[in-house]
Image (spheres, rainbow, N blue to C red):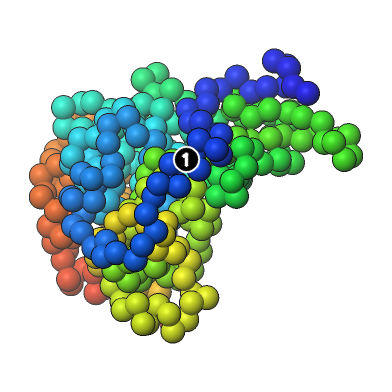
Amino acid sequence: MTSSENTGRGPLFTDPDPDVARAFFRKKKGALTDKLMSVPDAVARFVHDGDYLASGGFGGNRIATALLHEVVRQERTDLGFAGHTTTHDFQILAAGTRTGKLIFSRLDAAYILGLEARGLSAQARRLMESGEVEVCEWTNYALACRFRAAATGVPFMPVRSMLGTDTFRESAAKEIECPFTGKSLTVVPALYPDVALIHVHESDLFGNCRIRGITVADWDLSRASKHVIVSAERIVSTDEIRSDPNATAIPAFCVDAVCHVPYGSYPGNMAGEYFSDEVHLKAWLDAEQDVEAYRAFLDKYLYGVDCFESYLEICGGEERLAELRRLENSSE
């Protein structure tokens, strides 16, 4: 049993009913079809104003930078967003559109604003302090469990966290009595994003994906989301995928679009591929300190380029990327 005293007061932005989600998934085609398309085409087709968006990766690692840039360039607005282990990906979306409209207006917040040891994003802070974004608070673990509940096909997941905290009070979680032990538990509602953006190491043209290194919640996120767009460092043959099926982290039936984007996590880190560009991340953080300097920075690096490849070029191109690849794979 629950009451207003043991229920968080935060807003619930999505429907946790697995039967509602199942009605959608039942119509989703699972055939092995060629899903290769460009980044602009994938975003135009699967990301719409008002959608609920989730970003894969972990902190500054394996983030879908190219896809996130395109969401901003196509000026999607009024999105919901899952702020789960988000750093530079949150910073990108916090930029808003060139006309000043917000990319997202609803936020499930767990880890936002901070770029870990690099510091806090001044623009993200300005956005969150403006009061223009409706917020519901969670811990990173609780938000991951919401994806796990959705991937499992149940309406909620019990956890032993958040009770007695301000985070619980500002969440949409509930406290229940365990029917087996009589002890108090938190239950968090399933979260079914409309679309997830996930960067991977390898994919075939059908969307069977391999990930090296840390995956965090992406296994569950890919299965919980109604649509999944993956960007991949490499496109490999299906025969290669089938040679080691245990290495497939995301199966094709979850994926709607595959985009070939080498260095697609830049300036984030990609395990075994390239190190994060700490110089560029610092430049981004520094530019945010002054609003006019920040606008000029965005005009140069985000709004003013027509594609991710152009962005990579003005950030140093092949010479800089080769240096980051050496840093990631150095034994020193």
Where is residue 292 shown, x and y percent of the image? 17, 31
The reply to whether residue 147 is visible in this rendering is yes
Amino acid type indicated by mark 1: Ala
Figure label count: 1
Measuring 73% from the left and 17% from the top, which residue is drawn there?
Answer: 3
The reply to whether residue 117 is visible in this rendering is no
User: In this view of the protein, which residue sits in the foreground, 130 or 9?
Assistant: 9
User: In this view of the protein, which residue sits in the foreground, 26 or 158?
Assistant: 26
Measuring 23% from the left and 40% from the top, which residue is drawn there?
Answer: 72
Q: Is residue 143 left or right of residue 178?
A: left
Where is residue 231 shown, x and y percent of the image? 30, 60
Q: Secondary structure at mark 1?
A: helix
* Circle 1 residue: 23
Pointer 1 local density, CA inside 10 Å: few below 14, some 14–19, many at least 20: few
Measuring 49% from the left and 48% from the top, which residue is drawn there?
Answer: 224
Q: Is residue 6 above or below residue 207?
A: above
Where is residue 150 shown, x and y percent of the image? 55, 44
- From this viewpoint, which residue is outermost toward the top? 4
User: In this view of the protein, which residue sits in the foreground, 141 or 157?
Assistant: 157
The quarter of the picture where residue 241 lies is bottom left
The quarter of the picture where residue 234 lies is bottom left
Q: Is residue 193 left or right of residue 151?
A: left
Which quarter of the rendering shows the C terminus? bottom left
Which quarter of the rendering shows the N terminus? top right
